[in-house]
Every structure is written in C-alpha cells, then in structure tokens.
Amino acid sequence: MTDWTWEYEGYVPADERLRESLCTLGNGYFATRGALPECDADEVHYPGTYVAGCYNRLTSDVAGRRVENEDMVNVPNWLPLRFKLSGGPWLTPDNTPVIEHRQCLHLASGLLERRTRFDLGGERTLAVRQQRLVHMGDPHVAALRTEFTAEGFSGELDVEAALDGGVTNAGVARYRDLDGRHLTHVHTGTAASDTVWLRCRTRTSDIRLAMAARLNADAPVTATHKGPRASQHVRLSLADGRTVTVDKTIVLHTSRDPAISDPLRAAVDRVGRAPGFDDLLDDHLTAWDQLWRRSALDVDGEAGRILRLHLFHVLQTLSPHTADLDVGVPARGLHGEAYRGHVFWDELFVLPYLNLHFPEVSRALLRYRHRRLEQACTAAREAGRKGAMYPWQSGSDGREETQRLHLNPNSGRWLPDYSHLQHHVGSAIAYNVWQYCEASGDTEFLHTKGAEMLLQIARFWADAAVYDEDMGRHRIKGVVGPDEYHDAYPGAAAPGLDDNAYTNVTAAWVLTRTLELLRALPEPRRRELVERTGLDGGEMEQWEDVSRTLHVPFHDGVISQFEGYGDLEELDWEGYRRRYGDIRRLDRILEAEGDTVNRYRASKQADVLMLGYLFSPAELRGLFGRLGLPLGEDTWRRTVDHYLSRTSHGSTLSGLVHGWVLARARRAEAWKFCQEALQGDIADVQGGTTGEGIHLGAMAGTLDLVQRGLTGLETRSGALWLDPVPLPELSSYGFSLRYQGHWGVRLRLERGRLDIDVPSSEASPIDVRLPGRAVCLQPGETGRLVLGD
C-alpha cells in the first residue's frame, strides 16, 4: 500500500462485503460496490448500484404487523461479466483455485484495479486484469476494461457481459423479512450490433430507469435476452502469452434527470457517443485531479493514508455533481443498504467539511431540507405543534421514515423503535444553515431559504417548551437525545425523556441565532418574511424568554443527560465486558437478557458531550451564561469524565466526538479516540456494519477534525478564528480551503508555527484572529505566525 492506494491481497470470502464497501466507486450521481463482476449476489458477494435520491416505498408483513418502509433502490446491476474456457464452467474464485488475487483502489485516479490468476490445472493459468471506473466527469457513465492472458496454453474463451434487472434489496440481513423487490416492468432490447439496453421502473415511486451497455472486443458480439437480463456474448481466441481485451461501457439515466425526455433514449444515445476506454479514463483523471486540488489534505503517516480514503469516499458520495440534485446526505453513503439510504442528522458532521471546499454542494444539501420545509411544518401541525418538525429519518419527500419496529439480532425479537422522537435533528439543520453561510458568505441564502428554515425551527422549539411554575423555567418533554439508548423512563407507559440537555441547549442556540438574524435582515426582506409566516412581536418576545430560561439539569456537579438521569443505576461495566467482550451494542445485550438500558447510566454515543463538539469552549460558556447557568472549566471537565466512563461507543460517531472534545480540552486520551474514528470502517470496529455501507458522517468528521478540530478554526463575524491545540501524534499537517470567495487558501501547521497562504485574487482581505492577536492578509500574501504553547 502507498499513500494513494488501498490494496487487498488474497481471496478471503469472509472479507468480501467489507472490501466491496471500501472499494465502491461513485461520482455523486450513482455508485457501484466493488464486487467481482463474475460473481452473483449471494452470502459472500453483493454487487449493488445506487442512484442518489432514488427511493421506493413498499409494505411488508412483519411480526404480525403491516410495516411500510422507503428504501434507496438497488438499481439494475451493470457489472456482470463472466468468462469460461469453451465447454467448461464459468470461472469464479469460489469454484476455481486462484494462484494470485489482488484488488487495488487507486485513490488519485478513482480507479479500481483487480488482478487474478486462475489455476486451470495442468500448468495452465488464466490471468485476468480489470480496471473499473465510475466516471467523475460524466456522471451517467461507467466503464470496465478486462484483459485476459493465457499462460501455458492456447484456446477459446467465452465471455458474457450483461445488464441484470432481476436484482432486489437484500444487502442487509436484518431487513430480509421486508419486501425488497423494488423494480418492475423490466424490458430489454438491442440498439446496435454492440449495444444492448434495459429499462424498468420502481414499483410505487414510478421512477423510470434505463441502462445501455456497449461491448467492444476483437471478435463478433452477439446478444440474447432472457427474463430480466440483456446479455452480450463474445468468443475470444487465446494464444499463450498474448493479452486480449474486452471493454464494457454503460450509461445510466433515470426519469428524475434534467434535460432529457426519455431515460432509455438518453442512455442509448449517450453510450453510442461515448469515447473508448482510454479517452474516458483521461477525462476521468482530469476530473479527479481537480477534486483533489480543491480538497488538498497533507497529513503524514498512517493517519494521512486513512484520511485520504475517507476523503475519497466523501467525494464519491457528495461530489460537485450533487449540486444539481435534490438529495440529502445518506448516512451510509451510496455504498450499501444500511439505514435504507435514509438521511439522518449526519450532515451535521459532513457539511462543516464541505462548506470550506465545495460550498455549492452544501447549498444543494440545504436546499434538500428547504424543499421539505412544508412537509416538516405539516408534521408539526399533525403533532399539535407550530413551526417545523423535521423527521429523524428522511427520504424522498421529507416525511418521517423512521421505522416503528427494529430487529434485535441478539434476541430475534422485533421491538418498538422510538428514535423518531429525536427532534434535535431540527437544531442540526439550523446549525448547518448558519455554518454554511458563515463559511461561504452566502447572505442571499441566509436571508431567504435559510431564514425561513431557522424561523420555523425556532417556532417549533418555542412552542414545544412548556413553562414550569415551580422551576421558573421552560422545559421540553417527551424527546430522545443523541444517545438513542435511552428512549423512556424505567417502567414508564409512554416513551420519551424530559429536558435532554443537548436538545435544550441547542434549542436555545437556535432561538438566539434566529432572533439575531431577524433583527439583521434588510427591512424589506424582514417584512416579506413576517407577512408570509404571520410572525408577530409577541412571538419574538416569547422566543427571547424561552432562549434564556430553558432548563438544563445537573447532578453531582455535572450536566445531566436528561432530567432524572442521576437517579438511574450504575452498570457493572467490567462484568459485562468480561461476559461479552464487545459491548458496543449494550442495548441489544441487555434486551436479550430481559433487561433494558433505560435503567442505567449508560450511553451509546456522545450526547451531552456533543455540545463540546458543536461549540467552542467560549461559545458554550456564553450559551450557558445566557441561560443563567455558570459553566466553569471544572464543571465541564467533570462532565467529560462522567460520560467518558459510561459510554459504550455503539456508533462510529462516538469516537470522533470524544476525540474532538478531548483534543480541545488538551487531554492525553484524545488520540485514542481519534484513532478509533480513523479505524472505524477500515477495521470494521462495529462488527460487520461496514459491509452494509460506509459511515459517511464519521469519515467526513475525521477530515473536519484535522480541518477545524485541531486548528480551532471557526468562521464567524466575517473572520477566520484559529486556536490550534497541540496533539503530539499529529503535530504537522496542512490543508487548503475555500473561504468567502477565496479559492485555495492554504494552511500549514508545524510545531509552534502556522503558515497561511492566500492566493492572488480580486477578493477582499481575510481577517485572521488568534487568541490575543489579529492579522489581515491580502490576496497574494503569506502569513507566518508563531504559536504559543
């Protein structure tokens, strides 16, 4: 392996799903898992292809109930390309011995290379080399080059390439009781002597999908159509030591694409115009070169190599092509079917990175939320609330997609799922709006769509807050916090918790920022907004009051995760670790024992500590001060220690947040959690989850840890604020960013020194603020700043 490659050697069936996820290729429009083209979907292989925003809704009978789920659709499989000696069986690593097998993911070029040597017996070997790309320049194109070399023999080789419309969503074992047959009306045909096509549609969302495939080889190509497959066949003459090549080029379109009339015609026309593999590769390399320049990241050693892999997968899921789409941030990328491709709060961990590199993508992702603002307002009204209540899980149209049942694989029982009570997702959306506008300087978005979202989210929180006469404070009841393990009080008849500290503090932040924005709006725009939303002065006075009086519980001198948390029992952590080893999914372990995690001071992931992830120490103290609650360093340190020892880290986001918080607190344990965040997917620390799709939020979060966490970088009040923290294990690094019209601003941190290079342009100077000093850098200037200890 090198800094720019990710390589697997040997064929290990048990590792295939993991490798397929991490070797996925995509371009922001669609992605295909890194499965072997000659292998069908089974318990070992899963060759899924997913189009951003392509969902379908089905109803299933589960545990005696009718359950409706919307899934990101596994669209027809374009990969199939199998081969055999004439008269022999189709060759795969599962049925034929392999002398050598390697997969290499080339990060710089977005190319997946595979080399396999099949042992055919009698000193005969067939060497297969494949190069695969999902084109980063043209988002509808993918290509596969296959080279065959006979070693020790001559003969004929039969090759079959296909488009397969018989696929289902079957990539996650937990979901297999659910209906996964999303495609219908599959038809195939021949467009030219070397080209076949396939068209179909989704069963309920009625999205029309079309693929066209062109096969190029030094032999005649024939086509057959059987069931849901369009197949192409070629017979190659092999000579000992001579290489023959087959190129497969495909085009994918859907009825959601702009500037087309019919997906099938668009696919057939485009594949007919597509250049050969070499020219496609040249254009693809150019597109990737541009992406890497815009997101340059220079970190030494193993950490740097993993960060490049993370950046590679972020760019494949959310590329500049995403800016043209109506899509959100799928929590598991376009890499698999976990979470059904839904959009959670993970954009909270993704957009801060994109804001400073690809703001046009951030804006598009926020437009996804704005287009679903009306649905969020409808959901709030149906719940008896004002404003906007965004769903915990979102899909095509913004309704709540969170399942009402989930399977505990430890016990085999289907259990109620109350995670839809995580209304803090609204605060995450508001936070993302604010951060995007601060980083990009996009006042047009802030004053229009951003203001509309913030206003309705603030309105929801103000209406949800109930005044408690005895406390003299407002309270928000019946919610679930980021922890997710705690969804009810022990023995309670109804789900939900009161005064989740993270929920209440972020609600206070939303109310405060929305009031600031409304006061700063140009008067004509403010008048328009007031007229459209019916906002009046009395409502704003209520927001001011609630933003200062929301209740934040404490116990034993630390911030309580929620009211009553301090009354819960302590868990025998060491005892459970001795009995089970891995207790990340403590909730499943306890439920299988007939117990519930609701009884204990035990968290799945960072909850209260998320406040230290979102807000700098100074801003967090200011928020608590506005609430009339002092938050000294000792209180925060005790709070960090309390939850650090009571968290099972059942989410890949947990290590990231803990590493961030500990780094900002200059704690020696920080690197341990940073390492866990870096290893989350490549080591599959959650035990099999990576094979179902990568954890996009955790990957982007590690990039942002270097970009903002270790540098203390904030974009606020029209300036770049920096407060670097020393981390011995990562003391030298650099990156570029895009800030308010400045492209390619370069920051480099060495021990005790910070260099900032501002490229020449017509943009305004950049104000840089560090503790106790400020500098102003003109375009074309480089600043070298000596840092304190």
Image: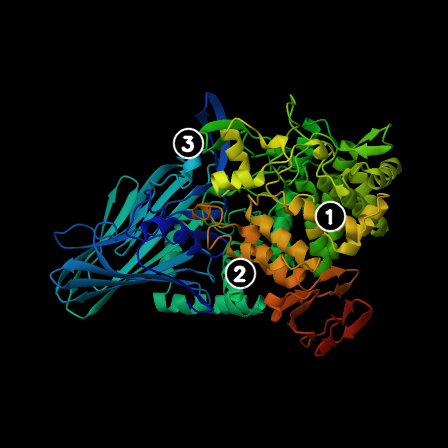
- State whether residue 649 appears in this view: yes
305 or 529, which lies in front?
Answer: 305
- In primary-sequence order, the first of circles 1 and 3 is 3
Marks 3 and 2, how far apart at CA? 34 Å
Marks 1 and 3, how far apart at CA? 48 Å
- Badge 1 is on which residue? 638
Q: Which amino acid type is shown beneath numbered disc 2? A: Leu
Q: Secondary structure at mark 1?
A: helix
Marks 1 and 2, how far apart at CA? 34 Å
- Badge 3 is on which residue? 179
- In primary-sequence order, the first of circles 1 and 2 is 2
Disc 1 and disc 3 in contact, CB within 8 angstroms = no
Position of 39 relative to 113 (above/below)? above
- In primary-sequence order, the first of circles 3 and 2 is 3
Q: Position of residue 235 (x, y in %)?
A: 17, 58
- Badge 2 is on which residue? 311
Disc 3 and disc 2 in contact, CB within 8 angstroms = no
587 or 131, which lies in front?
Answer: 587
Position of 439 relative to 58 (above/below)? below
Q: Is residue 129 toward the left or the right of residue 353 in the image?
A: left
